Image (cartoon, rainbow, N blue to C red):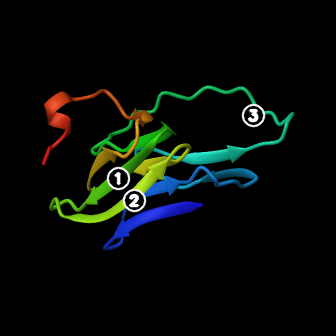
C-alpha cells in the first residue's frame, strides 16, 4: 500500500507500508526530487549488471529524508511551511516514509528503532528551523 500525503497540490510525504508488494521495480518520487525512493522485488537469479555512478554535480536546496521503521510504532505529524499541523498518521514496523516538503515531527508510541537516510553534508543549525 502506498500513501501520498498532499496539501494544496504539494507532495509532503510518500509512505510505503510494510505490506506493499509488487513485481519488478517502481519509483515513487518525481525525477526532480533530491532524494529518490523506489522499491524492487526481483526473483531468485535476477541480475543487476555491475555498475558505478558517475560524479555529477547536483544542487540540493531542500533536505529530504527517508525513514525506515525497523521496530515500534511512531506517530508522524505533518505541518505546512507556515507551521500549521494538518495531518497525523501512524507508522509501524516495516513502514518506510519519504519526507519531501513542509515540517514534520514524531512521537514514539512504542519503543522504536528508526533508520534515517538523507542528503549530506549536514549543516547543523543552518539545516533546520525548530518550532
Depth check: give the residue in front, 5 or 58: 5
3D distance between C-alphas at marks 3 and 1? 35 Å
Dot 3 or dot 1, earlier in sequence: 3
Q: Is residue 37 above or below residue 124?
A: below
Q: Is residue 86 left or right of residue 131?
A: right
Residue 89 disc label: 2
3D distance between C-alphas at marks 2 and 1? 5 Å
For label 1, the SS is: strand
Dot 2 or dot 1, earlier in sequence: 1
Give how far across and how far down residue 25 sits, in percent: 69, 49
* Residue at the image point whose x is 49% and y is 48% from the top: 92
Residue 48 disc label: 3
Dot 2 crowding, Cα within 10 Å, few <14, some 14–19, many 20+: few
Q: Is residue 52 left or right of residue 43?
A: left
Q: Which residue is mark 1?
A: 76
Depth check: give the residue in front, 127 or 52: 127
Dot 2 or dot 3, earlier in sequence: 3
* Residue at the image point whose x is 14% and y is 44% from the top: 130
* Residue at the image point whose x is 20% and y is 59% from the top: 81
Q: Are marks 3 and 1 in contact (CB under 8 Å)?
A: no
For label 3, the SS is: loop
For label 2, the SS is: strand
Q: Quadrant of the N terminus?
A: bottom right
Residue 6 disc label: none
Q: Are marks 2 and 1 in contact (CB under 8 Å)?
A: yes
Amino acid at each position: 500500500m502506498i500513501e501520498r500525503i498532499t496539501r494544496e497540490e504539494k507532495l509532503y510525504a510518500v509512505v510505503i507500508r510494510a505490506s506493499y508488494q509488487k513485481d519488478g521495480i517502481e519509483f515513487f518520487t518525481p525525477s526532480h526530487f533530491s532524494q529518490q525512493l523506489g522499491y524492487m522485488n526481483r526473483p531468485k537469479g535476477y541480475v543487476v549488471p555491475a555498475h558505478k555512478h558517475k560524479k555529477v554535480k547536483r544542487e540540493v536546496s531542500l533536505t529530504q529524508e527517508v525513514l525506515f521503521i525497523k521496530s515500534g510504532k511512531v506517530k508522524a505529524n505533518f505541518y505546512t511551511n507556515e507551521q500549521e499541523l494538518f495531518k497525523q498518521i501512524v507508522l509501524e514496523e516495516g513502514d518506510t516514509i519519504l519526507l519531501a516538503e513542509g515540517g514534520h515531527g514524531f512521537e514514539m508510541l512504542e519503543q522504536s528503532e528508526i533508520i534515517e537516510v538523507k542528503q549530506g553534508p549536514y549543516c547543523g543549525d543552518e539545516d533546520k528551523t525548530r518550532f
